[in-house]
Amino acid sequence: MANPSIGVMLDLDDTLVLSDAIEEFRRNRQWSKCYSEFSRTYLPEGTHSFLHKLREFATCGVVTTAPRPYAERLIAFHSLNLDVLVAYHDVKAHKPFPEPLLLGAEKLGIPTERCIHIGDSESDVVAAVRAGAMSISVCWTGNNSHEAFHYWSDVLRQIEKFRGA
């Protein structure tokens, strides 16, 4: 893609990768155990296809509150091809503050008003709004307390509306 029209930043855990099975290890900072259990994580249906279509017109990255080594390994484990990673130690103020998304947009080379953040939590939505980016919420389990999309195809349609396609 020569000249992307938008930037898309995705949250990692429970948005891009369904990682509930290793949540306890992450929460307790048991990184070795976490890494050894990556096979218990999985992608929402259609993730690779979604990213392939998205990359036709957007630069894509991950903005996460997870530490960089964990994020890099999880992204590699699932063979995800992304342009940018903003992780926990890259910023001082974390979501719901806008700093991670502002840094993500800067690294993508796209103004925040031309960026979309896709996440699964209220802090993702708040961070996007505070950064001046569009927010899209996803919920793969159906147990959400806010309006969210449940399929990548619906997310892609929303992104296409945003970019004016």
Image (cartoon, rainbow, N blue to C red):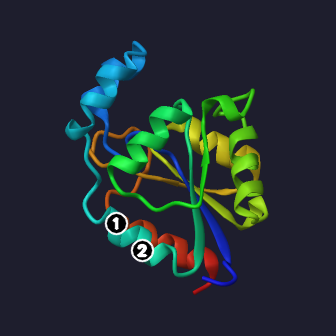
- Residue pushed farthest top? 28
Q: Is residue 66 above or below residue 165?
A: above
Q: Disc 2 vs disc 1: Cβ atoms closer than 8 Å? A: yes
Residue 98: x and y, percent? 73, 40
Q: Is residue 120 left or right of residue 4?
A: left
**Quadrant of the image containing the N terminus:** bottom right
Q: Which mark is residue 48?
A: 1
Does residue 15 appear in the picture of this structure?
A: no
Vertical comparison of 23 with 5: above or below: above
Q: Secondary structure at mark 1?
A: helix
Residue 53 position, x and y percent, is 43, 78
Mark number for residue 140? none
Foreground of the two, 163 or 145: 163
Residue 4 vs 64, above or below: the answer is below
Counting labels gives 2
Task: Say which quadrant the C terminus sits in.
Answer: bottom right
Q: Amino acid at mark 1?
A: His
Q: Amino acid at mark 2?
A: His
Question: Residue tagged by mark 2?
Answer: 52
**Residue 5 picture quarter:** bottom right
Q: Quadrant of residue 88?
A: top right
> Horizontally, is 29 left or right of 39 in the view?
right
Dot 1 crowding, Cα within 10 Å, few <14, some 14–19, many 20+: some
Residue 135 at x, y = what percent?
Answer: 59, 54
**Is 98 above or below relative to 154?**
above
Near-viewer residue (56 or 144): 56
